[in-house]
Image (spheres, rainbow, N blue to C red):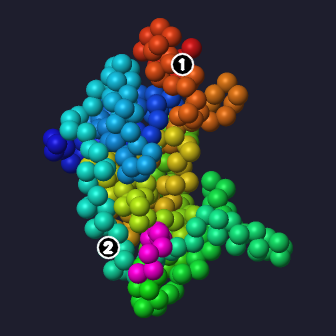
Amino acid sequence: MPISRPEQPVFRFAPSPNGLLHLGHALSAILNHDMAAAMGGRFLLRIEDIDRTRCRPEFEAAIFGDLAWLGLDWEEPVRRQSEHLGVYAAALERLKAMGLVYPAVMTRGEIRAAVAAAEAKGQAWPRDPDGTPLYPGRERGFTPDEQAALLASGRSYAWRLDMGEAVRCAGGPLTWRETGLSQSGEAASIVADPAAWGDVILSRSDAPSSYHLSVVVDDALQGITHVVRGRDLYHATSVHRLLQRLLDLPQPVYHHHRLVLGPDGRKLSKSDSDTGIAAFRAAGHRPADVRAMVLGER
Ligand code: GLU
């Protein structure tokens, strides 16, 4: 991988090959590419294929095909997360050594039942910015012996961040620089609120790293200076800033762009083939049409 000059901006587009790219991905990729070009920076492509149950080689091939068709070019070699699991495992070990993670075994069904029981008693249960109930944290504070017994029990488990401890350990307010909120691209300082996410998952017995952990490790390793991505990941940035602080990683500037909405006004989904880049290609549209469509130039 070419070494950047210290001041050279580095951008990345980081899709997961678990479906076909849609117009929202086209917008992300084009913005990253164009902003890098405008700033004399580098444009990297990263394949986020940690979740082996959902990622497929044919979707990865389609990503390369669609991006090339859009006229974008990126540096080789492309980083594939599945080829770097040891790096994420090392970051998790570091957080374990700091006493900030714990093994958690409650299933989705058990969590739902715990939340329903609390709500039946009139207790409001907190939800994360995506609307998912926070983890009850039953195993938080287990002794080392209790943890060892849990891990030896053969149940599937996840390593979860002890959010309360992690926020304490971060020791002071966390902010990030955001350039995606104003038309002019002026930077605003945003206060991060990682606690809103509760005890997030950092790895599972069946998936060696989570999105949150691998994204911050990779952004640092690849020297990413500017993270440009959709607003659906705006609130996740709070968790990323916390992990960056805990792991002593540099912080990029963030630019969360508007989402491209479907004809029904809802967020696009990879399973909706009508708004896939491939569908526009097949229908005879030109790359310039897609570019104009997502940038709102037409
Ligand atoms: N892999 C994530 C996705 O496809 C994007 C990660 C990021 O840009 O931070 O939604």
* Residue under numbered circle 1: 293
Q: Secondary structure beneath disc 2?
A: helix
Q: Which mark is residue 93?
A: 2
Viewer-closest of 61 and 11: 61
Q: Nearer the viewer, residue 76 or 230?
A: 76
Q: Which residues are magenta?
A: 152-160
Q: Residue furthest left?
A: 2
Question: Which residue is pictured at 64% across the width and 70% down the height?
Answer: 110
Q: Quadrant of residue 246?
A: bottom left
Whether 96 is drawn above or below 42: the answer is: below
Instruction: Work out whether 64 lies above or below 236.
Output: above
Report the amino acid beneath label 2: Glu
- Furthest-top residue in this view: 284
As displayed, is residue 244 above or below residue 155? above
Residue 2 screen position, x and y as percent: 15, 41
Q: Amino acid at mark 1?
A: Met
